[in-house]
Amino acid sequence: MTAATETVLATAASGPAAPSFRVRVLMARRELVERGIEIHARPFFSAEEAEAFATAGLAAKVRLLGRARRAVLQQVGALPGRTVMVSRQADFLPSLHLERSFVSGRRLVYDVDDAIWHSSNPAAGGHRLALLKGSRAKAKWLAQRATMVVAGNEILAEWVSAYSAHVEIVPSLVDAEAFPARTHTDRDELVVGWIGSRSTARFLRHLESPLDRVASRLAPRRVRLLVVGAPGPPIRGVTTESLRWSEATQLEALTRMDVGVMPLPNDPWTRGKCAYKALQYMASGVPVVADDVGITSKVLAEGSAGVVVSSPQEWAEGIEVVAGDAEKRAALGEAGRRVVLEQFSTRRWGPRLAEILAGG
């Protein structure tokens, strides 16, 4: 292993456990260190502050924001790194002061994995005051000043290309070696799994009618909806099990899933998503059923790793087809795992990301 020779400062308007920060900044740490790049992570919130902020009332949120922002501003000038990687944006407030402070005297690599310029769209599922974050203006400002913009997919790259001539696509990555391969068997219960956050859990309501139909058609075989990261909806004829997200519960859930689902409406916000739920399922050899939105079909290798659907009827039919027998699920799962290893793994992309962060 090569000793780290370059420190890169990394930040985002989140805590260290936020999905985007983990995936886009921390996931490839091992590969980066092997190539002489050390990440110094300084997101807006500490882990404790992020957890408190998620459950706080409005007044407490304001106090937490103010305290955390003052702490970052006091530290930023002394933080290590001649290069800073900003993921999405650095601050929750519309002012560019914090972004300017991080960028001052440093080379900027701007990373974007969501269409944050649509974050005030109700479909984004954020706070009703999301417009006040100024995400569209921040994305434009950061893209214009970056020596390189790293976009999670082609749709995002097209938008930021209006503000930067230096845009490269690096997909959201999976440490495939950390995911145990699912062994599929035919059982009396079909486990339909979903991993995500509260902001996207509302899309599970789109599966109420399809799963009701699946449960009716598969009876007496039981159907379980296993939800990780948010409360799951009650569905007639289906047992809903909800687990709080952690790396351990995520991995344990993936060993139980027969099918992984990714329901999404089709709108400007969701079309910019990087299909990360599907990639997690695929990394574990779990076949996927997902809405045909944005890059989903491409990620699923045009159906070789699962079923792409566009209507409630297709959802029910897709789950039934995949649920049919263990041999079919195993074949789809093996194809999906192969796609992740070849196209979306940290081993595949770590070298290029190291070059970008080092200035190459």
Image (cartoon, rainbow, N blue to C red):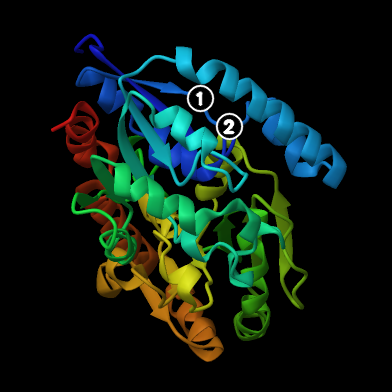
Q: Residue at x 25, y 60 (%)?
A: 161
Q: Residue 306 at x, y = what percent? A: 36, 70
Can the viewer see residue 319 in this picture? yes
Category of crowding for the residue at label 1, using alpha-carbon neighbours closer than 10 angstroms: few (below 14), some (14–19), many (at least 20): many
Q: Residue 234 at x, y = what percent? A: 78, 70
For the N terminus, the quadrant is: top left
| Kind of residue sitting beneath label 1 | Arg
Name the residue carrying label 1.
Answer: 42
Q: Quadrant of residue 239?
A: bottom right
Question: Which disc is residue 253 wearing?
Answer: none
| Kind of residue sitting beneath label 2 | Phe
- In the displayed structure, would residue 182 be above or below residue 266? above
Spatial CA distance of label 1 from label 2 is 7 Å
Q: Residue at x 48, y 69 (%)?
A: 270
Category of crowding for the residue at label 2, using alpha-carbon neighbours closer than 10 angstroms: few (below 14), some (14–19), many (at least 20): many
Say left or right for 52 vs 197.
right
Name the residue carrying label 2.
Answer: 44
Q: Nearer the viewer, residue 348 or 238?
A: 348
Q: Residue at x 57, y 44 (%)?
A: 95
